[in-house]
Amino acid sequence: MPEPPPSAIPANADWGSDLDPQWYYAPIPPRPSAKSLALAVLLFSLTLCTCLVAGTQFAVAYSRNEAVSIDELLRAFTLFYKDPAGLLTGLPFAATLLGILLAHELGHFFACRYHHLHASYPFFIPFPNLAGTFGAFILIRSPMRTNRALFDVGASGPIVGFVFAIPALVYGVMHAKLVPGLANPAHAELIYGTPLLLRLLEAAFHRGTSPDALLLPPIGRAAWVALFVTSLNLVPVAQLDGGHILRSLNVRAHRALSLALPVGLIALGWLHFWDGWYIWGALLLVMRFLRIPPVYDPASLDAKRRFVALLALAIFLLCFMPSPISIPPSSP
């Protein structure tokens, strides 16, 4: 016979006291379903393929002292039927990026398990762009019962992913090439921005050299993509990771910034920093008006978690780029 469901939460429950765990820890399956696992494996395999294509492009561009080659990206897709072994040159990029993204999502996943929240396996999003993916996500099918759970789930992913990205970025900076004119709009197909963390590392390992003239190898470029994804996730808006963190700290600030920051990002696009901010800002504005389930225990976070919140803010500042990608105008 199955066990009866836990008792309903009493209307007069005192969340500040030691409650019976059955009131707020609903039973969850020991693991996600087999269908969820099969879908996760399929999406990961497809994303591995698209990331191998992107990595092959970066490897060839690096050997030619170029940041990117659109022609090489298109040619790399033909290797699937012409020369599949040729895609192995993209493995360093693909393995690095997928490893960091997986660490990020597993941070969320295990935080959910710790707080007895029902979550899916990580789902990757394959896409034939320069990175080979639009990132990954997990589905959380349980309500956030406490502020502590909301904070831990939101902060765990970006912090774990950032820790995994640092060694790859350090390796990339140490093996970067000095290519004068790399960011010259007259010659470059695409110019990558430089986050604060990368500038600090380049100042430490390449003193007296302009960061714009350093060409990262594929492993370093994978770390750059991971930092960019981390910065997008840590924007303190709606139900992004940064939004979870801010909401657990201050609901009013979360509500206000969920409207103000998307407008600010759209303004960055209007000021020609990056056209992608129009899309990201619009998506965040839509998310602002979606219903957010309530947190049953709004108790304030402890001092340790508040310190981790400052750490998450520092990571955001180290990773954020107002102009992550710029496309120079075509030469006459």
Image: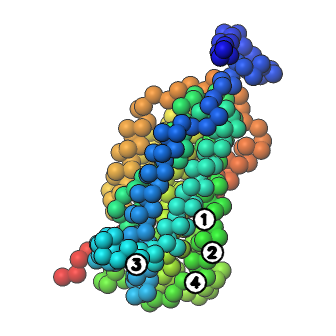
Gap between marks 3 and 4, in whole Å?
Answer: 23 Å
Residue ID at (63%, 67%): 166
Return the residue at label 4: 175
Return the residue at label 1: 165
Of labels 3 and 2, earlier in sequence is: 3
Return the residue at label 3: 86
Position of the N terminus, as image quadrant, is top right
Amino acid carrying label 1: it is Ala
Do callouts 1 and 4 mark residues in contact (Cβ within 8 Å)? no
What is the secondary structure assignment of the residue under circle 2?
helix
Q: Position of residue 92 (x, y in %)?
A: 52, 73
Gap between marks 1 and 3, in whole Å?
Answer: 26 Å
Locate residue 146: give its quadrant: top right
What is the secondary structure assignment of the residue under circle 4?
loop
What is the secondary structure assignment of the residue under circle 1?
helix
Of labels 3 and 4, earlier in sequence is: 3
In the rendered structure, find residue 170 and report the number of the disc placed on it: 2
Is label 1 or label 3 in front?
A: 3
Do callouts 2 and 1 mark residues in contact (Cβ within 8 Å)? no
Q: Position of residue 96 (x, y in %)?
A: 55, 67
Q: Is residue 54 rendered to the left or right of residue 162?
A: left
